[in-house]
Image (tube, rainbow, N blue to C red):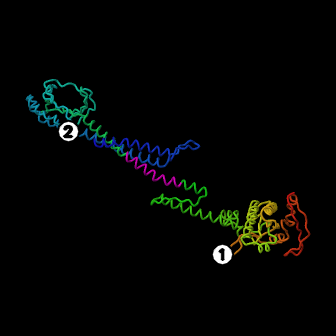
Amino acid sequence: MLIKTYILGKIPLLGSLVQKIFARLKSEHEFTFSRKFSIIIPIWLQVSIAIIMVILVTIVTISMIFLKRQEQQLHFYSGKMGLASLNYFSSNARIPLLENNVLMLNNLIKDALDNESMVYALIVDRNQIIKAHTDHQKIDSELARFEDVTNINKTGKAVYFTHITPDGKKILNITTPITFNRIELGAAHVGVSLDIVEETIKNDRKVILFTTGYILFFAIIIAVLLGVRFSRPISELVKATEEISRGNYSHKLAISRRDEIGNLAFSFNRMSDELFKKSLMQETFGKYVGPEVVKMIMDNPGNPWLKGKRNQATILFTDIRGFTQFSEEKEPEEVVNLLNLYFETATRIITAHGGYIDKFIGDAVLAVFGVPVFHENHVERAVRSAVAMQEEFKKMSLQQNDFFGKIGIGINSGLVVSGNIGSQSKMEYTIIGDSVNTASRLNGLAGSGEIIISKNIMLQVENEFEMYSLPKQKVKGKAEAIEVFKLTGLK
């Protein structure tokens, strides 16, 4: 009764807990449907349900086995107790029954009802006349026929069967003959109540039911706590993964546990650090060698182009006319600011046209088209970038400083050698060759705001751009004068 009272007192708390569970489910892990309309069930709820189901199935299975075993044992002991009383009656009733001593026979069975489970005890003669009965009113009457007899069994001389009394009681009747010198004098009957057994089982079932509710009450609490303990780090890991996918490599998991989840969080944070370092290296390295080169290095570090290779390419040089005098007349901070703006503009336009900034040389820019990333129209790309730069520099000259109007550009196309050049401690991806030197000489011929191209360039873009021929020029490194052209813009 104490357990029953305690459990009944906890039922409102159990209902409140269930409401909180579904409130949490709705607020933190709302059910969403995928494209296939499948319900996403949070892991904490799955773990909780799994733990509760395991506990529930275990309790029900054990309870069923226990109740079945207890019922069998109660039936066994009831039958054993009835048979013991029956054997006592049959052994001591021979002489009184032979002498028809009714008083002695009734004295023999008068204490039978002291046992709570014993419903009746009686002795009959060979004519089925009751000579002794726990109900004295039935003495000397004929034994009535048993109603609703079932489960008839025989063990030795004893006969067992179940029957229902007129008042609805379920009785296990045990009968054994009373004999003397192998002559049957009559029989003894005892009736053991099966209702007591069923009532005992019923009470035990109630106790188990309330005990199960008690256990489930705490099992739900423990299951939810365990489920949340396991699911919360996973939810944080999902959020962290989303942050990483957005490029936020500095995101960390604040999980400190001495288990597999703790190891996972530690590995994730280490991965995040490595990705951050790689991203930082790629971003920083890209400022020195160009993003396209960085990508090629990352994708295939062993590519042969890093080791030196001959390629057809277009080389573009830009330089500022009168820069030395200008830098002497201006403050260093102003010179640096203007140079940075000039380099920024040139880099942006060259990169937009698929070119690669090889290096900055003082106030000059060396760019190449066709390596390290090959483009079929690398000549046209170089010329278009030169035209775009001069147009942009002209605007900047009018709006900001005439410094930007003094930039000359030279372009040449031909065979170059590209690859990593340097020492073990310092390497640089660059291009070398006669075509590069010629482009530098052409740049030296270009005046402020001019674009000077070689014959190789002219032959490939003369149908698209306006240009005119200049007198042949003698340049350093060439035995004969070379043909040069001044490009004025698009046709």
Q: Which residues are magenta?
A: 217-237
Q: Nearer the viewer, residue 478 or 110?
A: 478
Q: Position of residue 358 (x, y in %)?
A: 74, 68
Mark 1 vs 2: CB contact within 8 A:
no
Residue located 85% across and 64% down the image: 457
Q: Residue at x 44, y 42 (%)?
A: 19
Residue at image point 42% right, 43% down: 18
Q: Which mark is residue 425?
A: 1
Disc 1 versus disc 2: distance between alpha carbons? 102 Å
Amino acid type of the residue tagged 2 in the rendering:
Met
Q: Is residue 181 visible?
A: no
Residue named by callout 2: 81
Residue 86 circle label: none
Quadrant where the C terminus sits is bottom right
| Spot occupied by residue 121 in the image (x, y as percentages of width and height) | 17, 32
Residue 221: say if magenta: yes
- Residue 347 appears at what percent x and percent y? 74, 64
Residue at screen point 55% across, 54% down: 239
197 left or right, relative to 478: left
Q: Could you tell me the amino acid type at mark 1?
A: Ser
Viewer-closest of 483 and 125: 483
Disc 2 crowd rating (10 Å Cα; few below 14, some 14-19, many 20+) is: some
Secondary structure under tag 1 reads loop
Query: Image check: 50 left or right of 427?
Result: left
Left or right, 113 with reference to 440: left
State which quadrant residue 136 falls in. top left
350, above or below 93, in the image? below
Single out the mark in the foreground, 1 or 2: 1
Rendered view: 451 above or below 218: below
Query: Magenta residues: mostly which secondary structure?
Result: helix
